[in-house]
């Protein structure tokens, strides 16, 4: 028997290319809402400011410092403020349109389907643990063709806990009818995925797509999904 039987993947930035998909979605919003005419100098400026605020607010959200609804619209609001546009109704409209369109995007990282087929062929049980919102994440998974690969999908909303909190990892084990010694977490976020799983007693695979400097020790580190074939 292999050491691991249950492989738990993160979704965004690990399999589903959040940056590419969000960039396309935000470009659509920028054009549809005529944001340049409203005073934003360029899409690149808007995207950079949105990305900055989204990253910062997600960190606060995972620490329980802000609510889900605040995260959704304030990342838009703050990006608009950086362009000296104080329009709260516009920010809230953008938040709704963004979450309506984003899950329809289907770009995944290279070799995603190949590695999932490979792992399924070797009889691993595959699962997802994601900090995303339930409805949004389920739509992403379905539209991208990922649904058939995963036995369970655990969102922070369903678990009522966010990575890196240990409760979400315990909840995922319960949902998968797995034990920690047979399980491993595969993700890109050193704090949420790697440190969180490690603190819960799990082995980990750090998926270092962007080749950042590791600051949290992981059981394995890869820079391309195909390298999982060397582990499993």
Image (tube, helix red, strand yellow):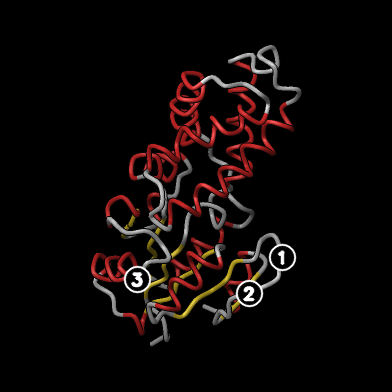
In the depicted view, which residue is nearer to us: 230 or 222? 222
Nearer the observer: mark 1 or 2; the answer is 2
Dot 2: element: loop
Horizontal side, residue 222 vs residue 205: left or right = right
Q: Earlier in the sequence, mark 2 or mark 3?
A: 3
Which picture quadrant has residue 37? top right
**Could you say where residue 149 lies in the image, as x and y percent from the top left?**
40, 57
Task: Name the image quarter holding residue 222.
Answer: bottom right
Q: Which residue corresponds to mark 2?
A: 215
Marks 3 and 1 in Cβ contact (< 8 Å) = no
Tag 2: Cα neighbours inside 10 Å, few (<14), some, or many (≥20)? Answer: few
Closer to the observer: label 3 or label 1? 3
Residue linked to disc 1: 211
> Mark 1, residues whose alpha carbon is within 10 Å: few (<14), some, or many (≥20)?
few
Q: Which residue is drawn at 24% across and 65% down?
A: 175
Q: How crowded is mark 3: few (under 14 residues within 10 Å), some or many (20 or more)?
A: some
Above or below, comparing residue 102 to residue 60 in the picture:
above
Residue drawn at (61%, 57%) of the image:
111
Query: Gap in Å between the C-alphas at discs 2 and 3?
Result: 20 Å
Position of residue 123 relative to residue 4, above or below, is: above
Can you tell which mark lies on residue 166?
3
| Disc 1 from disc 2: Cα separation | 12 Å
Which of the image's four quarters has the N terminus?
A: bottom left
Indicate which disc, 3 or 1, sits on the residue closer to the N terminus.
3
Q: Is residue 105 left or right of residue 177?
A: right
Vertical order, 166 against 220 (above or below): above
């Amino acid at each position: 028997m292999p050491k691991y039987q249950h492989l738990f993947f993160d979704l965004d930035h690990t399999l589903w290319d959040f940056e590419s998909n969000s960039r396309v979605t935000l470009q659509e919003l920028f054009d549809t809402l005529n944001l340049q005419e409203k005073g934003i100098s360029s899409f690149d400026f808007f995207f950079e400011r949105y990305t900055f605020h989204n990253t910062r607010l997600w960190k606060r959200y995972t620490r329980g410092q802000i609510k889900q609804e605040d995260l959704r619209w304030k990342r838009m609001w703050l990006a608009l403020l950086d362009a000296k546009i104080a329009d709260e109704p516009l920010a809230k409209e953008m938040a709704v349109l963004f979450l309506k369109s984003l899950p329809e995007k289907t770009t995944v990282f290279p070799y995603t389907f190949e590695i999932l087929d490979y792992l399924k062929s070797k009889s691993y049980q595959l699962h997802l643990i994601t900090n995303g919102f339930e409805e949004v994440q389920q739509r992403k998974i379905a539209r991208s063709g990922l649904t058939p690969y995963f036995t369970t999908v655990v969102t922070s909303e369903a678990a009522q806990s966010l990575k890196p909190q240990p409760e979400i990892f315990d909840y995922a084990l319960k949902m998968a009818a797995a034990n920690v010694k047979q399980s491993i977490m595969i993700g890109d976020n050193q704090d949420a995925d790697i440190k969180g799983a490690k603190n819960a007693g799990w082995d980990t695979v750090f998926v270092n797509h962007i080749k950042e400097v590791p600051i949290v020790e992981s059981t394995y580190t890869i820079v391309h999904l195909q390298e999982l074939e060397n582990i499993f």
